[in-house]
Image: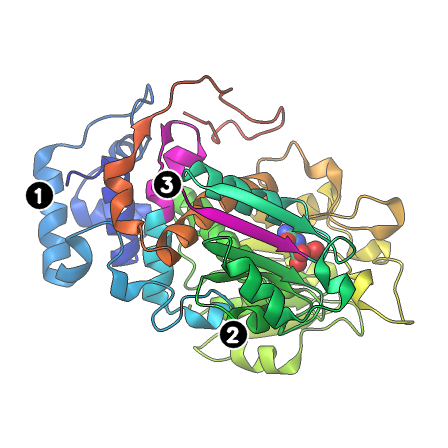
Amino acid sequence: MTLPQQTLLRDAMRSLNLTRDAFCDRLGVSRRALDSWLLPDGSNEQRSMPTVVARFIAEIMATQQPAKYTQSVPNPSSNIVAGSPHLLSVSQFDRESVQALFRLADLLQPVARRQKVCRVLEGAVLANLFFEASTRTRISFGAAFCRLGGAVCDTTGFTFSSMAKGESIHDTSRVISGYVDAMVVRHPEQGAVAEFASATHIPVINGGDGPGEHPTQALLDLYTLEREFSRQGKLIDGCHIAIVGDLKHGRAVHSLVKLLCLYQRLTISLVAPTGLELPSELMDQLSRNGNQLRCNQQLAQGLAGADVIYATRVQKERMGSEALEGYSPDFQINLAAVQNWCKPDTVIMHPLPRDSRPDAHDLATDLNPDPRLAIFRQTDNGIPVRMAIFAQLLGVDQQVPHALRDCNWRHPPHLGPEDAAFDVLE
Ligand code: NCD
């Protein structure tokens, strides 16, 4: 199998854990040459890598990690699911299975970016069962399944489901598994998605269980971070990440923090209003691996020196009578705060939705034209990451490279008017 040059290079950098600059040094090539080899096939600036370089990379990889280099498609033993057909928690991952998933997501990027089509799930049906509010998670799971050739059935809310008639999770799950090949479930109670999974052998994916976990969100966040850093020549190991907001109830943060525990030498600044701090067991996990943990109540101190800011909204729906209306204005991340306290290349992320009501003081819209704002690159990356998850869980990951075909419709080069110039749909 011949891999696309871009995939081969990305795989190699990832497996060797080298930044672009360090990879250039290792190969003895200029950064400019590497950048041009890393552009997608068909891009005007893209250049072919000389065969001698490809051979040299193969030799380096063969000495270091022979098993990993022989195929870009992850080997099934390094899949998420070792031992489980379901994806319920990021705790199912180790660093190798995260990298295997991301390699597959890279292979699927051309499908997400409308250059290729891939129908490895033709005939399969997904049930999207969302018992809590959702826009992007539900639609992106559905779109990812459709882009792999499958079809999707949706149900939203309790009102129109048989749970309103008192049906148990067990019965609902078993019934639905007679109709479909996979389920994505979002539920307001922590642990409820695991209960769905215990009643079926078809794959169940946790689309968010109350304040518990949101594993696919954290995976797409980490994938985005890796891609942003790869462009900047940085690695996740050793980076400084500021996590800001409702760290107590945010399940996306809970999953992300657990995934970050797979990395080393991080500096993590936690910035939360009183009462919304990260649960202590997650703090304990984070402070292992030589990571440095800083708790701040001042935004300026938390953001200073950060390579990435991960902002979140106040989860009012999970609070009782103590409900905050929103953050006080001094918690708001806006253009002025970023200009005053952040570096020129700080990556700004948020799982979305951002609460745009004026009293919420969530991530401000005046950052929209700033290319440091990665929130829509983050949502776009939900598609290749969720496609990769489906492909692994349904056992078609090995077929992906052989199933990519050109797509025959037109799409605009940028999806939104404020998209960064470097983020082109080739
Ligand atoms: C998050 C969620 O639902 O947990 N949203 C999402 O899925 N992207 C975060 C949130 O609602 O604040």
Q: Magenta part of the protein: which range?
A: 105-130
Indicate whether residue 8 is drawn in magenta. Answer: no
Q: Which residue is mark 3?
A: 108
Q: Label 2 to label 3, Cα distance in Å?
A: 30 Å
Residue drawn where x is 63% and y is 35% of the image: 370
Tell me the quadrant of the picture where the N terminus can be found. top left
84 vs 140: above or below: below
Disc 3 CB within 8 Å of nearest ligand 1 atom: no
Q: Position of residue 323 (x, y in %)?
A: 88, 66
Closer to the observer: label 2 or label 1?
2
Q: Is residue 35 left or right of residue 62?
A: right
As rendered, which of 32 and 217 lies closer to the eye?
Answer: 217
Colour setup of the view: rainbow
Q: Is residue 245 visible?
A: no
Q: Label 2 to label 1, Cα distance in Å?
A: 48 Å
Looking at the rendered structure, the kind of residue marked 3 is: Leu
Q: Sequence order check: which comes first, mark 3 or mark 1?
A: 1
9 vs 203: above or below: above
Q: Which residue is mark 1?
A: 55
